[in-house]
């Protein structure tokens, strides 16, 4: 015989409606009462009838997580996305929700998958893990009034989107100032992406930091094609670059390999600092000095903010800023 809500209510000494509200994590129920109800559920072996509850509420109790259009192997295997998705999934489980991924090889395919997931009511809304200009997916979510949260800062729809993000301008400034404090004056920003907003914000912070101290600002270098590597070698030599800022840890490994293949040493000849503090930062020596963006906190708060949007789609949209911290390791040398 299956355990019912009434059985749980009798065990705790509360009304069945209290148990029902606890299942929905309703704010009218105190945390103490919720904890008592949950312990009783575990003790009695109560399993919620999710299908019936979803049917009654017209909700799927699932959130869609939208990855950027894959395109390259770098994006598929980037540990930042894996860490954020893991945090979203962990937070979702606390709210009896499931997580579904929306992916695509290009923007058109990604949009079709997002539309299909929402039209078929497989998800109640989405969390976007990327930001790009002229994004058809974001246009669709806003036009159709789909509940969503963005990890990042959009180019538009500032009043229509809730965001959880780092202050990427400050991240760029932090990395640059750290190198300046170590005695580096010729600093180069190196990236493998130009379209993502977080790159533009970090590069802007780099430019502001150097400009305010009357130091030379170099145009960023992109490493994608074979010719880019030759151009980078020339720029490092001609500009007497002593330090590079890499867009993330995964790319920093490639940059360090390039530096070493050209008979330079890290950090003796060229220092390197990057972002994310992912598993790649301690994969091989020298361990990478990196700025921790608190990816797990980004994921947890993105899901919490999504739930706020789901409860009340006309609620005030917010921008939540997650703090960062610099992790010193082995790839930056001091000249002071």
Image: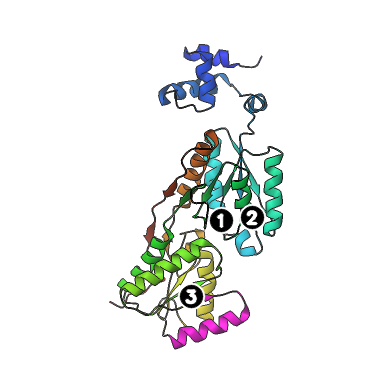
Q: Which mark identifies residue 130?
A: 1
Report the magenta residues as a range: 221-239
Q: Give the CA distance from mark 3 to mark 1.
A: 21 Å
The prevailing secondary structure element of the residues shown in magenta is helix
Q: Are marks 3 and 1 in contact (CB under 8 Å)?
A: no
Q: Secondary structure at mark 3?
A: loop
Colour setting:
rainbow
Within the image, what quadrant is residue 107 found in?
bottom right
Mark 2 vs mark 1, foreground winner is: 2
In the drawing, does residue 327 fall left or right of residue 86? left
Q: Earlier in the sequence, mark 2 or mark 3?
A: 2
Residue 246, image x, y percentages: 48, 69
Q: Position of residue 36 (x, y in %)?
A: 45, 21
- Percent of width and height locating residue 228: 58, 80
Q: Say which mark, if any, is on residue 322.
A: none
In this orientation, which residue lies closer to the viewer: 158 or 42?
158
The answer to whether residue 12 is above or below residue 239 is: above
* Residue under pointer 2: 136
Tell me the distance, in whole angstroms, between the alpha carbons under discs 2 and 3.
Answer: 28 Å
Is residue 109 in the magenta section?
Answer: no
Q: Give the number of the disc on residue 220.
A: 3
| Viewer-closest of 193 and 58 | 58
Q: Distance between the Cα atoms at labels 2 and 1? A: 13 Å
* Residue depicted at x 45% and y 45%: 318
**Is residue 139 placed above or below 5 in the rendered structure?**
below
Q: Are marks 2 and 1 in contact (CB under 8 Å)?
A: no
Q: Which of marks 1 and 3 precedes in the sequence?
A: 1
Residue 135 in the image: x percent, y percent?
Answer: 61, 57
């Amino acid at each position: 015989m299956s355990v019912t809500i009434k059985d749980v209510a009798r065990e705790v000494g509360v009304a069945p409606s209290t148990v029902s509200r606890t299942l929905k994590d309703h704010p009218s129920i105190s945390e103490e009462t919720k904890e008592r109800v949950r312990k009783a559920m575990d003790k009695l072996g109560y399993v919620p009838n999710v299908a019936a509850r979803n049917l009654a509420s017209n909700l799927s109790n699932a959130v869609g997580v939208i990855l950027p259009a894959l395109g390259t192997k770098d994006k598929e295997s980037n540990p930042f996305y894996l860490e954020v998705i893991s945090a979203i999934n962990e937070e979702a489980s606390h709210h009896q929700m499931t997580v579904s991924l929306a992916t695509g090889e290009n923007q058109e395919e990604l949009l079709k998958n997002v539309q299909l997931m929402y039209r078929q009511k497989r998800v109640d809304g989405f969390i976007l893990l990327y930001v790009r200009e002229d994004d058809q997916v974001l246009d669709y979510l806003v036009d159709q009034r789909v509940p969503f949260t963005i990890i990042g800062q959009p180019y538009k729809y500032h009043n229509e989107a809730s965001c959880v993000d780092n202050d990427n301008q400050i991240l760029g400034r932090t990395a640059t100032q750290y190198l300046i404090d170590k005695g580096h004056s010729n600093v180069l920003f190196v990236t493998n992406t130009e379209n993502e907003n977080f790159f533009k914000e970090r590069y802007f912070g780099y430019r502001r930091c150097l400009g305010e101290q009357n130091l030379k600002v170099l145009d960023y270098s992109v490493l994608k094609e074979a010719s880019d590597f030759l151009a980078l070698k020339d720029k490092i030599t001609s500009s007497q670059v002593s330090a590079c800022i890499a867009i993330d840890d995964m790319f920093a490994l490639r940059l360090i390999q390039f530096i070493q293949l050209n008979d330079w040493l890290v950090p003796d000849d060229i220092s390197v600092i990057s972002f994310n503090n992912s598993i790649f930062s301690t994969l091989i020596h020298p361990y990478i000095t990196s700025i921790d963006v608190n990816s797990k906190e980004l994921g947890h708060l993105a899901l919490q903010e999504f739930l706020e949007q789901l409860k009340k789609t006309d609620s005030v949209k917010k921008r939540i800023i997650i703090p960062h911290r610099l992790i010193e390791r082995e790839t930056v040398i001091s000249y002071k």
